[in-house]
Image: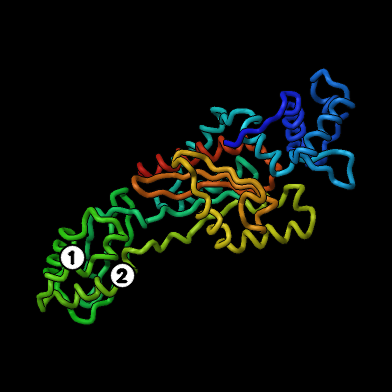
Amino acid sequence: MQEYQLKDREKAILRFVIHQFILTASPVGSRNISKKYNIGLSPASIRNIMADLEELGFLDHPHTSAGRVPTDKGYRVYVDSLMDPPVLDMQTKQIIDVNLSQAPSETEELLKVTTNILSDLTNQLAMVTYPKFEQAVLERIQIVQLSSTRILVVVTVKSGLIRTITLEIDAEVKEEQLAAVQQFLNEKLSGLKFYEIRNTIGERIKNFDEETYRPIVRVFLDSVDRIFTDIQSDKIVLSGAKNILKQPEFADHEQFQSIIELIENKDIIIHILDKKQPSNKDDVVVTIGEENRDEKFSDYSMITKEYKIGDLQGTVGIMGPKRMDYSKIIAAVVYVAQQLSAELTKK
């Protein structure tokens, strides 16, 4: 957390200005602060402090208004040290718990429900990325015969998640052959991470080259990238476009178009999320405006938290205008991530 050399009066005024701007979406004047908050300072004194905060880069002064608005730097000091502690009330927690517990057991449906809950709670664009399988540890492989030349490969990882892939074989195979290959593969590959299997499978199964099993072994070698690559790493569930578009910031046509483009191009959001690595895996990450390091996101803030299923993790988060109720939204994102982890572990 960055240290800011601000006097107590400056901190108080900055906090009140941001509170008011979050509530009204309008530039905040000294008279507004004087009337709204009983802080024992005249409008003139407040105006002088606001001018100092502007000079220090924490506030900005729109040309068309006498009031001030927070800058990215102002929001940052607010989030780091001035906002109320993030706390979620019991009623909101119960709503989250009930909705998640009643969600379908399929991972994809559960993630959709999660984004809907988070979007409704925050009135922002909610997002959840799929668990990343790159670090997944293989528990077992099952091979199911679909026909004489087609097999279904069922891959179970330590976290309990399952993936299935259908493969075509160039020769007819029998169930006993599949059973023998299945046993051999589990002996050689169980307990390894996906990337380890991709890099070493050729060496690990080279001794299993009897003529009767060769077509099955060959299809596994040829399909290793399909079976053990993170095919869902580029998948993300978004919800709440209608909510975010109700914000006053999007009354401007140009801003409206920009958020629509971001929502339609999920790759941009995934790219930003991939770069947002928490310093501590248990941390919530808040990036504000230009901190997102992409010009397209300079008008937005993102709040994200990892959720976990065993060794796997994905990301829960929201994106919205910088003028947001950070304390409430951080609390919601953290709790939803925790409860999603618990539900996925149970299911």
**Where residue 134 appears, x then y in whole percent?**
36, 57
As rendered, which of 177 and 213 lies closer to the eye?
Answer: 213
Q: Using residue 266 as the reference point, say whether residue 44 is left or right of it.
A: right
**Dot 1 corresponds to which residue?**
204
Q: Is residue 77 visible?
A: yes
As rendered, which of 209 and 182 lies closer to the eye?
Answer: 209
Q: Is residue 244 above or below residue 8?
A: below
Amino acid type, callout 2? Thr
Which quarter of the figure is the C terminus placed in?
Answer: top left
What scheme was used to colour the molecule?
rainbow
- At a point 31% along the width and 59% down the height, the residue shown is 194
User: Which residue is situated farthest in the top direction here?
Assistant: 40
Amino acid type, callout 1? Arg
Which quarter of the figure is the N terminus placed in?
Answer: top right
Which mark, residue 166?
A: 2
Q: Secondary structure at mark 2?
A: strand
